[in-house]
Image (spheres, rainbow, N blue to C red):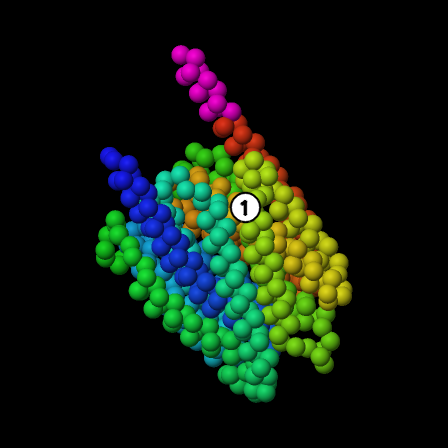
């Protein structure tokens, strides 16, 4: 092959990678912008329409159970019939969820909305991410996954942040709508209506931009996918047994699920309680959460030089950021004044963002391409098992003892779970040492 041919091939590879990134990051931004629009006010909407704090926690548990039941078969379905097709179904269910939430005035209807949302999230889990990683590795087998995942997380956080500002700003601008709990379109519910519109845009963009060659069956067969669940689980558990890293990552994911659900569910009522009832501004909720995602972008960017400073040791990266996350939760729980509370909330969000990309890079490095969607779904399933426990147990504790008590417990659990990553780093180091010994023996021979 001539020099010109080599250069042409390299340029084509670079163009393919750039195009894949543009498409995937665009989809991420739109998806998470739609997710962010109602996110700052959804819990407050449910409380305004008559639900209790524990009923909200029960809905989070039901939502998580839905995901757990569907994660594995939908992950295998994506591997079989194509990531694009499964993603389109996901966005359709999430559109229906927005409509149900908009019309909900009782626990059963809210439950329907959360079940539909859970179906959508289960379908979406791992589908487009697996498409993205497979497309990249098909172009460049040794591509740095941690960096591209961190870049993708930046678009996630940008979409969420802008969505939160837009949703809460819209709510504040339309504060003269009927009071919440009395009509369909109210200050708290109007962002949900806009999220439905954006989700329709996402469906169109996915249809037009995502190109995929499907290696599996072209027929849509959810029944067959459900029958294959046992095989998928067995394959996943077999892979986990062969890997000394995956079980440790699953244990860490379970603990993270417990902590994340309590942070996501309770931040709105917590900060609402710290605000003056007569001077409450709905835009402040967008500032709090939108600002946290802006801080999260910094956390994602910080993870790239942090990897370099720590010599590429992803386990130590996760351990350090989780230690900051857990200790930040304990300090956050002790704050009773709004501004310091926001500051420590943002510190927690910074740590979460810097923690995510090395964790996912560790996981993806252990997974073969043909099992990627299924294994990512299994990992998500384990995390949602933690969410279920956190929602039911910690939700009850929050109702009895208060949100700050639950957050303090979460922080302590997170600090203890740092041991998972310490063990992962030890296993990885032993593997590298063994490779080095093997190379030295081969060189000697």
Q: Residue at x 75, y 58 (%)?
A: 334
Residue picked out by circle 1: 304
The secondary structure type at the circle numbered 1 is helix
- The residue closer to the viewer here, 144 or 32, is 144
Would residue 2 be seen by someone viewing this image from the given angle? yes
Quadrant of the image occupied by residue 404: bottom right
Side (left or right) of 379 relative to 284: left
Q: Residue at x 48, y 45 (%)?
A: 146
Boundaries of the magenta span: 433-445
Farthest front residue in view: 4
Is 383 magenta? The answer is: no
Q: Quadrant of the C terminus?
A: top left
Q: Is residue 232 above or below residue 194?
A: above
Q: Quadrant of the N terminus?
A: top left
Secondary structure character of the magenta stretch overall: helix
Q: Residue at x 62, y 74 (%)?
A: 283
Count of numbered marks: 1
């Amino acid at each position: 092959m001539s020099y010109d041919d080599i250069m042409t091939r390299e340029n084509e590879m670079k163009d393919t990678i750039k195009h894949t990134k543009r498409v995937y990051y665009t989809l991420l931004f739109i998806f998470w912008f739609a997710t962010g629009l109602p996110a700052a006010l959804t819990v407050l909407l449910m409380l305004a329409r008559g639900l209790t704090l524990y009923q909200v926690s029960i809905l989070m548990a039901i939502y998580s159970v839905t995901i757990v039941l569907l994660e594995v078969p939908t992950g295998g379905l994506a591997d079989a019939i194509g990531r694009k097709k499964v993603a389109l179904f996901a966005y359709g269910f999430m559109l229906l969820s927005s409509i149900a939430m908009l019309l909900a005035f009782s626990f059963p209807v809210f439950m329907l909305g959360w079940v539909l949302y859970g179906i959508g999230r289960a379908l979406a889990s791992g589908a487009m991410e697996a498409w993205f990683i497979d497309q990249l590795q098909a172009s460049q087998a040794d591509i740095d996954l941690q960096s591209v995942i961190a870049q993708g997380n930046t678009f996630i956080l940008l979409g969420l942040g802008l969505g939160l500002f837009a949703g809460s700003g819209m709510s504040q601008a339309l504060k003269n709508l009927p009071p919440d709990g009395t009509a369909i379109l109210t200050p708290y519910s109007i962002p949900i209506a806009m999220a439905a519109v954006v989700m329709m845009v996402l469906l169109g963009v996915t249809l037009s931009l995502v190109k995929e060659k499907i290696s599996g069956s072209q027929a849509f067969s959810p029944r067959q996918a459900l029958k294959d669940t046992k095989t998928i689980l067995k394959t996943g558990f077999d892979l986990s047994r062969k890997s000394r890293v995956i079980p440790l990552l699953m244990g860490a994911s379970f603990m993270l699920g417990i902590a994340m659900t309590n942070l996501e569910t309770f931040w709105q009522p917590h900060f609402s309680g710290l605000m003056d009832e007569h001077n409450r501004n709905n835009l402040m909720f967008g500032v709090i959460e939108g600002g946290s995602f802006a801080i999260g972008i910094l956390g994602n960017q910080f993870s790239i030089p942090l990897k370099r400073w720590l010599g590429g040791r992803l386990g130590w990266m996760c351990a350090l950021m989780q230690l900051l996350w857990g200790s930040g939760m304990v300090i956050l729980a002790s704050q009773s004044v709004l501004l310091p509370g926001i500051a420590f909330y943002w510190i927690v969000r910074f740590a979460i963002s810097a923690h995510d990309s090395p964790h996912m890079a560790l996981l993806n490095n252990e997974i073969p391409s043909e099992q990627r969607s299924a294994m990512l779904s299994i990992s998500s399933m384990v995390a949602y098992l933690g969410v279920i426990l956190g929602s039911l147990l910690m939700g009850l504790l929050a109702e009895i003892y208060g949100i700050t008590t639950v957050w303090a417990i979460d922080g302590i659990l997170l600090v203890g779970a740092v041991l998972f990553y310490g063990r992962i780093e030890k296993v990885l180091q032993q593997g590298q040492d063994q490779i080095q010994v093997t190379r030295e023996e081969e060189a000697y021979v």
